[in-house]
Image: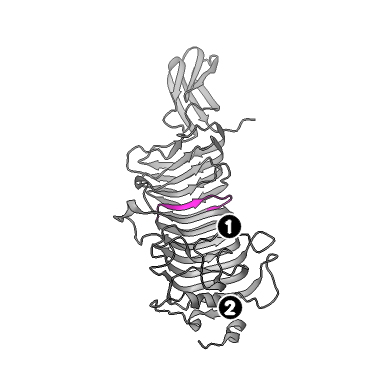
């Protein structure tokens, strides 16, 4: 193989065909691309980003618009580094690609310099830097990844400020993208799906895997579509943000979940302006969870699942729900393991539903009549059973106002009584989930 290594190192751009990679996808290009990665990880100076993470000076692995067959993961040297990009082409797994690995692995558990991979890597391997991170400012951009139903698409471990931009990932069996540990993985303008479909696929009930699996903190998904997988987005970290995410990966009817928030008691998650298309959101013991300005189609709903019986700081507001007139509630409680016993600062309100049953933590009602007792029943609207911890009522009459009082609040019913019978109108507002002082 003949190429000008010094020229490549001076420009910091490494065209993989110069290393012998086959852009037609006919022959295995694994070693050629790993060779380019190995050379790119030769730092041009002693500069560092976070202490202990070498600055590669903007090194780029350029796939030159080709399609490349690979039989082993494209892993990074165990030293870690930063300011590095892979972009501009397609990667397809061969028929003998390891079924428990990922096409691209940003992880110290892999070593590209060896040109061979151990199929049983420890992805939680110690990071290279004193900060606890192994990689910084890594960009994976303008890529198509086809896992050939043999493992996953991208693995990112112990990396900070990682960008995954304009990528199309398909035919995975584990995860389209798995980000584990680290901090601030930003995924944007990307399409993820196990099977290539635009919905209504006859194989939908058999979809498996997870589109995006975020096992870390402070990550963001923006303008992302998950079009086929059992779970669209799995969140098991804190302070993650999802905006403009469209999940039609697998319908709830077939057991699919659009977005699953799995860190009981520590969710701190914002889901805003998203589109849940025939599947919904599941949140375990949510604490500081916001779901707002999102659209739920086809009886898609939000399930709040009790694991330890705690729900705090949850806001489900200003969403649109559209169903099939089956009376499906827009929010479900799953208390099969244990009931919610700690309910604080929960607001489910101002949601608009067509063809579905509204559930809320705030309800308003009016009772009229010539009577001394008025009962308002909010059981069909209020989410939590037998819980009203704030009541505001007004008794209005054209005559003399009698003595009156709130006599009973139980089983989500309110009873107001007066000292004598009068023709009156009683207006009542009730709330659940209000913090007590």
Residue 207 highlighted magenta (yes or no): no
Q: Is residue 164 visible?
A: yes
Q: Residue at x 53, y 31 (%)?
A: 431
Left or right of 248: which side holds 110? Answer: right
Asked which colour scheme the image uses, the reply is one colour
Q: Looking at the image, which is closer to me, 227 or 81? A: 81
Q: Which residue is mark 2?
A: 39
Q: Looking at the image, which is closer to me, 163 or 437? A: 163
Q: Residue at x 44, y 39 (%)?
A: 331
Q: Looking at the image, which is closer to me, 425 or 59? A: 59
Above or below — where is 184 with respect to 142?
above
Q: Which residue is mark 1?
A: 124
Which x, y percent locates residue 35? 53, 77
Quick one: which residue is furthest to the left in this view? Answer: 202
Q: What's the CA distance linking mark 2 and mark 1?
A: 25 Å
Per the image, label 2 sits on a secondary structure element best described as helix
Which x, y percent locates residue 115? 52, 73
Which x, y percent locates residue 68? 43, 75
Q: Of the two numbered discs 2 and 1 on the same chain, state the one appearing first in sequence.
A: 2
């Amino acid at each position: 193989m003949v190429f000008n290594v010094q020229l490549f190192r001076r420009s910091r751009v490494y065209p993989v065909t110069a290393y012998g990679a086959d852009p037609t996808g006919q022959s295995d290009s694994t070693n050629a691309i790993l060779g380019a990665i190995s050379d790119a990880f030769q730092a041009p100076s002693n500069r560092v980003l976070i202490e202990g993470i070498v600055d590669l000076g903007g090194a780029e692995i350029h796939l030159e618009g080709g399609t490349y067959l690979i039989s082993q993961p494209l892993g990074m040297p165990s030293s870690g580094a930063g300011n590095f990009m892979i972009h501009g082409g397609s990667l397809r797994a061969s028929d003998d690609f390891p079924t428990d690995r990922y096409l691209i692995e940003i992880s110290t558990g892999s070593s590209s310099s060896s040109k061979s991979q151990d199929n049983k890597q420890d992805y939680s391997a110690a990071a290279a830097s004193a900060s606890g991170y192994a990689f910084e400012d890594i960009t994976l951009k303008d890529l198509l990844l086809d896992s050939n139903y043999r493992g996953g698409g991208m693995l990112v471990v112990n990396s900070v400020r990682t960008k995954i931009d304009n990528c199309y990932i398909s035919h995975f069996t584990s995860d389209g993208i798995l980000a584990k540990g680290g901090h601030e993985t930003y995924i944007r303008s990307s399409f993820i799906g196990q099977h290539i479909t635009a919905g209504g696929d006859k194989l939908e009930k058999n979809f498996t895997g997870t589109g995006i699996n975020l096992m870390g903190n402070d990550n963001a998904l923006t303008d992302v579509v998950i079009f086929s997988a059992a779970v669209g987005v799995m969140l098991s970290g804190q302070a993650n943000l999802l905006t403009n995410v469209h999940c039609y990966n697998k319908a709830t009817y077939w057991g699919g979940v659009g977005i699953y928030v799995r860190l009981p008691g520590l969710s701190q998650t914002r889901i805003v302006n998203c589109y849940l298309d025939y599947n919904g959101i599941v949140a375990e013991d949510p604490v500081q969870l916001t779901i707002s300005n999102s659209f739920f189609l086809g009886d898609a709903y939000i399930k709040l699942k009790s694991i330890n019986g705690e729900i705090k700081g949850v806001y489900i507001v200003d969403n649109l729900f559209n169903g099939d007139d089956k009376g499906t509630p827009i929010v479900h409680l799953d208390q099969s393991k244990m009931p919610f016993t700690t309910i604080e600062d929960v607001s489910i309100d101002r949601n608009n539903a067509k063809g579905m049953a509204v559930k809320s933590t705030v309800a308003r009602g009016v009772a009229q009549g010539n009577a001394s007792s008025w009962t308002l029943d909010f059981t069909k609207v209020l989410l939590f059973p037998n819980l009203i911890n704030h009541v505001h009522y007004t008794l209005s009459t054209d005559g003399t106002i009698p003595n009156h009082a709130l006599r009973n609040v139980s089983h989500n019913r309110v009873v107001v009584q007066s000292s004598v019978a009068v023709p009156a109108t009683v207006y009542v507002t009730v709330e659940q989930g209000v913090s007590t002082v």
